[in-house]
Image (cartoon, grey):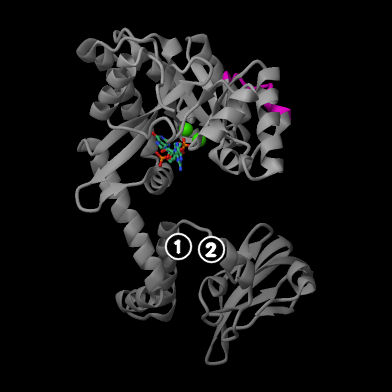
Amino acid sequence: MVMSLSNRTKRQIFEPGAIIMRQGDIGENAYLIEEGQVEIFVENNGKEQILGHRGAGAIVGEMAIVDNKVRTANVRALAPSTLLAISREDFGRRLAHADPVMKMVMQVILARYRAVLHGTEAAQLSAEEAEKEGNISEKAFETIRMTHDFREAILGYQLRLHYQPIVNLLTGKVVGFEALMRWHHPVKGMISPAVFIPLAEDSGLIVHASRWALREGVYMMNRLKAEHGLAEPWFISLNFTGLDLAAEDFADNVAEALQGTGVHPSRIKLEITERMLIDDPEGAISTLKRCRDAGLTVALDDFGTGYSSLSYLHRFPIDTMKIDRSFVVEMTTSAASLTLVKTIISLAKGLGMSVVAEGVEKQEEADILRDNGCEMVQGFLFARPMAEPDLVLWLNDYKSSNNTISKP
Ligand code: C2E
Ligand code: CA
Ligand code: CA
């Protein structure tokens, strides 16, 4: 049922003695008490039993908006009271976006709470609830299971990095690589980062995975030189999330990872997203500045998707802007996308940044980008992300064609 706007937004004022909700009624709203004082009571054999009092800032009637059960108590105003309704519909919409584990735990707590109120067997009631909420529970179980599996993946060496070359369009030379994480799950096989990175962020495990990736990426650069004689001063781009950057010791940890490896800090590029800059601008600025002072460079990933705000760009210490694949894909068929790409390139250049275009699959796209001053690209046209042995083969091929990309 869709409640009318006027009902939903209305402040309701109750005079002393007025009944706000009745035991046994179906409740459509919980109420936040903005002002006043209310009394919660139940009726037993015609006698009132007071359960408690609530004042400004408290919530009453919250159970009914979580499940569809009837009110378990009465609420009466003791003083003139102003109440703000939280409708079941609003709450349901918020709940639909909530983390499945949060949802499941909340359902169980509520079921147990009701069981205590009614004196029913708690275990029995929560089993019923669990069955009713079957879909939610299954999703929650899967999230919890996968989070445990991911923890084991970090400890059990199931994570890998694949490397995608980044090419300078003007010289035809490889300038660096982006490191992209892969998870080889022992049962489920290869899992996409689009699936496990959000899971790793929600659980906070991303911080450990990112630290592993940083070290692994640096070791790989060393191995290219020490074991394979591939000694160009390529950079390596690594992806980080807001949680990584928020760690107090982020900059120190990066410096530590580089210590004694012979890899110069200027060869490490930190890829961050616009979202991280919006969420905590001051924190991000200070962390990125420290990293840059230590010699690292910073790339703004997926530029143009979602959170772009031109007003912040010049405030952040950014060296490279990465044009999102979605613009590159549409550039050849949509005049508007082409205009956007051109604008992003000149914006980046105007701010003194270099530009990398992502997801270049066609020669035509590479030509347009080069003609418009975009010097660096990455995409399947040149190479897919590769495991280290394949990268070594690819680089040897590249070396034998005189350090230029022979095809395309
Ligand atoms: P991203 O950072 O934007 O990475 C580029 C994605 O585009 C990669 O997907 C890459 O394989 C794909 N790609 C590159 N060239 C082409 C192309 O020509 N065509 C097409 N269709 N795709 C292309 P991947 O490896 O699946 O990674 C997806 C996302 O997962 C990444 O997007 C990044 O947001 C996240 N991710 C991957 N590795 C890490 C990591 O180590 N840490 C963090 N925090 N996130 C990561
Ligand atoms: Ca990236
Ligand atoms: Ca990207």
Which of pointers 2 and 1 lies earlier in the amino acid sequence?
2
Total labels drawn: 2
SS assignment for the magenta stretch, majority: loop
- Whether residue 184 is visible: yes
Residue 128 image point, x, y percent: 35, 79
Residue type of the residue flagged with mark 2: Leu
The reply to whether dot 2 and dot 1 touch (C-beta < 8 Å) is: yes
Residue 125 image point, x, y percent: 36, 78
Q: Is residue 194 left or right of residue 315?
A: left
Q: Is residue 249 left or right of residue 43?
A: left
At horizontal 66% and vertical 19% (from top left) the residue drawn is 349
Specify the quarter for ligand 1: top left
Residue 61 image point, x, y percent: 59, 72
Based on the displayed image, in which of its 4 quarters is residue 240 positioned? top left
At horizontal 36% and vertical 12% (from top left) the residue drawn is 402
**Ligand 1 closer than 8 Å to label 2 CB:** no
Residue type of the residue flagged with mark 1: Lys
Based on the displayed image, in which of its 4 quarters is residue 183 positioned? top left
Residue 108 on the magenta segment: no
Name the residue beneath numbered marker 2. 95
Looking at this view, is 143 or 130 the one in front?
A: 143
Instruction: Point out the residue furthest to the bottom here.
Output: 45
Residue 316 on the magenta segment: yes
Looking at this view, is 193 or 330 the one in front?
A: 330
Within 10 angstroms of label 1, few (less than 14), some, or many (20 or more) residues? Answer: some
Name the residue beneath numbered marker 1. 103
Within 10 angstroms of label 2, few (less than 14), some, or many (20 or more) residues? Answer: some
Residues rendered magenta in the picture = 311-319
Q: Secondary structure at mark 2?
A: helix
